[in-house]
Image (spheres, rainbow, N blue to C red):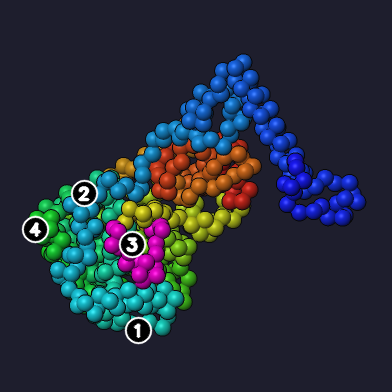
């Protein structure tokens, strides 16, 4: 390098140390770096000339790589093996006309109960205020809060809309035996509000739209019941069917209220979480109390026909997917089983609930797992998601806990089959299990796991097939042996998918 090319004179301390001028030093480093790069490129080209080309990541994902490539590409995505599972939440099971109504539910509300421009501006704030009244400010909330026009409007525009999204996803995939209703049957919806459950049932089950049913809708708010009936009639008109007969019943579950006929189906959605929070009594006492009240409304097996075969009833309880609500659902399930009812969904068995929120396994270990199910809300109506963001109540997931029970013939047949399986405990090669959690990383097992409910109790299912089941999926697994390994944290039997 020429002297004129030097940018600055070399400092005295570099001269004393015998170092080269900075520009020459940098040039030498760059030349050395380039020389190493050229050597590496030449070495790689020679290697490729001698050996066949390595498999790509996509080929590794298909399992066609050699052992060396498999070790090198251990982070490559693995193609999931097929899993024979029945999903609990299935969007495709919802009828197309129902999906269209839910997508444009705000338009239907506006046609029934229109909002002025000013009311539309303050709607997100009204929704947020009502949300506080339903959650952290529940104790200070006045009793007749749903008689307020602004509260009813906020509820049907946001909470009812979200509940329809949740309930239709749950109700539509249920088996055909879930609601064996016939002409002349009565349905009782407790805590009906703006008739959210009857509307969800109408949308989810087109087979029931042609039935001549009488639906008793019980709630303390006459304003909410009135708005709900208007919405139900609008939905029925959209589907071009004759609506069910709606009978409004103003009152509370704890009051001495009677309806003219026994119900073939009783539904309660988002009712008992408030009951449990307001009461000082223990949950097991409340479960016994309210199960007796519901049974007083239900049609017994001897009420239907002369031989008693047709007089069956079903009970559907749905609550938010929080620990207290899930615990109460489990207690109500036990209470109804003692009264000759059998769970149809989500339970794959009639044994003791292994996810009751307070459970001791066969080894004496305490398990605090509670039964709840969730699905992503990315495919919810876009306008509902936008409204949620404006109210600062964005939802990424929708969760719930529920149980559907029946004392009918189908339930009896299911119960008989379950008893046969129970008598052959620890011998059956395969059994059903319901996935009740998201994926769990298990570094010690080098796998991903999922908690599941089964007739053998709580399971920890290892997903060695990379099937990636979803929350609520009903799967088949190999029944664990008597000396099967257990999870140290939960006490669950460990099985492999």
**Between discs 2 and 1, the one toward the N terminus:** 2
Q: Secondary structure at mark 4?
A: loop
State the quadrant of the N terminus.
top right
- Number of numbered tags placed on the structure image: 4
CA distance for labels 3 and 1: 29 Å
- Which badge, 3 or 1, comes first in the chain's sequence? 1
Choose the circle earlier in sequence order: 1 or 4.
1
Provide the residue designation for mark 3.
385
Q: Nearer the viewer, mark 3 or mark 4?
A: 3
Could you say which disc has been placed on residue 95 in the image?
2
Q: Is residue 137 left or right of residue 260?
A: right
Q: Of discs 2 and 3, which sits in the foreground?
A: 3
Say whether residue 22 is visible: yes
Front: mark 4 or 2 = 2
Q: Residue at x 24, y 57 (%)?
A: 103
Dividing the picture into quadrants, the one containing residue 215 is bottom left
Q: Is residue 393 magenta?
A: yes
Left or right of 90 on screen, residue 50: right
Farthest-out residue, top: 50
> Pointer 4: what residue?
242
């Amino acid at each position: 390098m020429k002297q004129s090319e030097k940018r600055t004179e070399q400092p005295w301390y570099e001269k004393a140390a015998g170092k080269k001028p900075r520009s020459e030093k940098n040039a030498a480093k760059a030349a050395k770096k380039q020389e190493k790069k050229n050597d590496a490129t030449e070495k790689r080209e020679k290697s490729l000339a001698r050996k066949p080309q390595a498999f790509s990541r996509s080929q590794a994902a298909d399992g066609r790589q050699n052992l060396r490539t498999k070790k090198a590409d251990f982070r490559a995505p693995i193609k999931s093996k097929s899993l024979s599972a029945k999903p609990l939440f299935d969007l495709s099971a919802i009828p197309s006309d129902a999906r269209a109504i839910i997508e444009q539910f705000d338009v239907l509300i506006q046609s029934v109960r229109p909002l002025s421009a000013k009311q539309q501006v303050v709607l997100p704030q009204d929704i947020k205020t009502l949300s506080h009244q339903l959650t952290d400010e529940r104790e200070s909330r006045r009793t007749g809060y749903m008689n307020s026009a602004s509260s009813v409007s906020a509820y049907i525009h946001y909470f009812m809309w979200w509940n329809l999204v949740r309930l239709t996803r749950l109700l539509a995939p249920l088996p055909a035996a879930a609601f064996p209703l016939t002409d002349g049957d009565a349905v009782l919806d407790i805590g009906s509000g703006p008739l959210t459950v009857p509307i969800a049932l109408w949308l989810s089950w087109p087979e029931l739209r042609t039935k001549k049913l009488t639906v008793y809708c019980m709630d303390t708010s006459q304003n909410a019941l009135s708005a709900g009936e208007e919405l139900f009639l609008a939905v029925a008109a959209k589907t071009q069917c004759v609506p069910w007969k709606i009978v409004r019943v103003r009152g509370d579950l704890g009051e001495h209220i009677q309806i003219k006929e026994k119900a073939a189906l009783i539904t309660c959605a988002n009712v008992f979480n408030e009951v449990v929070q307001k009461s000082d009594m223990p949950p097991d006492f409340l479960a016994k109390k309210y199960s007796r009240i519901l049974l007083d409304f239900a049609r017994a097996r001897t009420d239907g026909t002369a031989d008693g075969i047709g007089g069956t009833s079903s009970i559907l309880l749905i609550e938010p997917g929080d620990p207290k609500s899930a615990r109460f659902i489990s207690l109500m399930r036990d209470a109804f089983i003692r009264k000759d009812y059998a769970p149809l969904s989500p339970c794959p068995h009639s044994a003791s609930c292994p996810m009751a929120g307070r459970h001791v396994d066969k080894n004496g270990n305490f398990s605090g797992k509670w039964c709840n199910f969730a699905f992503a809300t990315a495919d919810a109506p876009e306008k509902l998601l936008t409204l949620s963001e404006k109210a600062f109540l964005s939802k990424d997931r929708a969760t719930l806990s529920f149980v559907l029970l029946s004392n009918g013939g189908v339930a009896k047949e299911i119960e008989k089959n379950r008893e046969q399986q129970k008598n052959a405990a620890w011998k059956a090669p395969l059994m059903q299990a319901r996935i009740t959690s998201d994926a769990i990383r298990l570094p010690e097992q080098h796998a991903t796991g999922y908690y599941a409910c089964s007739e053998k109790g709580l399971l920890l299912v290892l997903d060695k097939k990379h099937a990636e089941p979803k929350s609520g999926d009903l799967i088949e697994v190999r029944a664990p042996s008597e000396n099967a390994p257990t999870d140290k944290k939960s006490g669950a039997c460990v099985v492999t998918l």
